Image (spheres, rainbow, N blue to C red):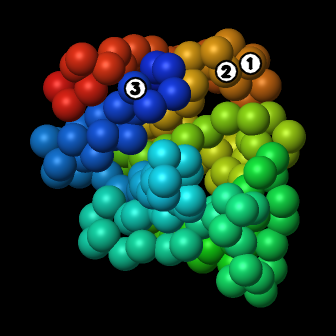
C-alpha cells in the first residue's frame, strides 16, 4: 500500500511525515528539511527519521560555493549526488531488512525526470512494501500515472492541520 501525503507548498507535508513516524514508532526513511535565509530558501538537508543523521542535499544557486564534489543542477538548486548515493544505499539496506513503512519526502518533478529519488522509489514500489511519500498536490496524478501506482490512498494536509496525524 502506498500513502501519498499531499498539499500545497509549505503546507506541512514534511511535518506530517515526521509526526506520523514518531506516533507509530515504526519504519524509517528520510525527510527534507528546508532552511531559509533573508526570506528565501537557502538549502535543504535530508534527515533520517530513526537516528536524525543529516546529509546536505541541495543549496540554492545564490549561495552555492562548490561545496559538493558531485553535483547536478536542478532549477535554481545544486543537488549533492554523493548524498543521493548514501541515501540510496540506506534505502537498499532498509528494504533488505524488511523495515516498513518506508518514508520518502518531497517526491516530484525531479522523479518525473527519472532523477532524484526515481530509482529508490521504483525499487520500493516494485517490492510492494508499505511506502509513505509526500508530493505537492499538483503532481499527485502525474506521479501515480508515471510510477503506475494502483494501490494507494491520498492524505491531504492543510496548513491549519499540518501537525495533526
* Residue contact at pointers 2 and 1, CB within 8 angstroms: yes
In the rendered view, does 98 fall on the left or right side of 38? left
Label 1 sits on residue:
142
- Nearest the camera: 119 or 158? 158
Give the number of callouts: 3
Q: Residue at x 50, y 20 (%)?
A: 8
- Nearest the camera: 10 or 52? 10
**Mark 2 or 3, nearer chain start:** 3
Badge 1: how crowded within 10 Å, few (<14), some, or many (20+)?
A: few
Secondary element at tag 2: helix
In the rendered view, does 97 fall on the left or right side of 56? left
Q: Quadrant of residue 48?
A: bottom left
In the image, residue 21 sits, relative to residue 86, either above or below, namely above
Label 2 sits on residue:
139
Q: Disc 2 to disc 3, how far (Cα)? A: 15 Å
Q: Disc 3 to disc 1, how far (Cα)? A: 20 Å
Label 3 sits on residue:
11
Amino acid at each position: 500500500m502506498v500513502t501519498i501525503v499531499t498539499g500545497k507548498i509549505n503546507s506541512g507535508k514534511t511535518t506530517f511525515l515526521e509526526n506520523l513516524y514518531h506516533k507509530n514508532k515504526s519504519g524509517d526513511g528520510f525527510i527534507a528539511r528546508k532552511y531559509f535565509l533573508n526570506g528565501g530558501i537557502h538549502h535543504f538537508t535530508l534527515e533520517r527519521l530513526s537516528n536524525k543523521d543529516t546529509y546536505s542535499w541541495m543549496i540554492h544557486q545564490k549561495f552555492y560555493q562548490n561545496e559538493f564534489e558531485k553535483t547536478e543542477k536542478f532549477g535554481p538548486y545544486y543537488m549533492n549526488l554523493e548524498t543521493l548515493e548514501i541515501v540510496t544505499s540506506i534505502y537498499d539496506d532498509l528494504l533488505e531488512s524488511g523495515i516498513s513503512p518506508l518514508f520518502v519526502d518531497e517526491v516530484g518533478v525531479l522523479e518525473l525526470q527519472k532523477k532524484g529519488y526515481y530509482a529508490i522509489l521504483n525499487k520500493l514500489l516494485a517490492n510492494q512494501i508499505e511506502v509513505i511519500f509526500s508530493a505537492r498536490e499538483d503532481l499527485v496524478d502525474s506521479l501515480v500515472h508515471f510510477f503506475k501506482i494502483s494501490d494507494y490512498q491520498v492524505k491531504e494536509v492543510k496548513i491549519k492541520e499540518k501537525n495533526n496525524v
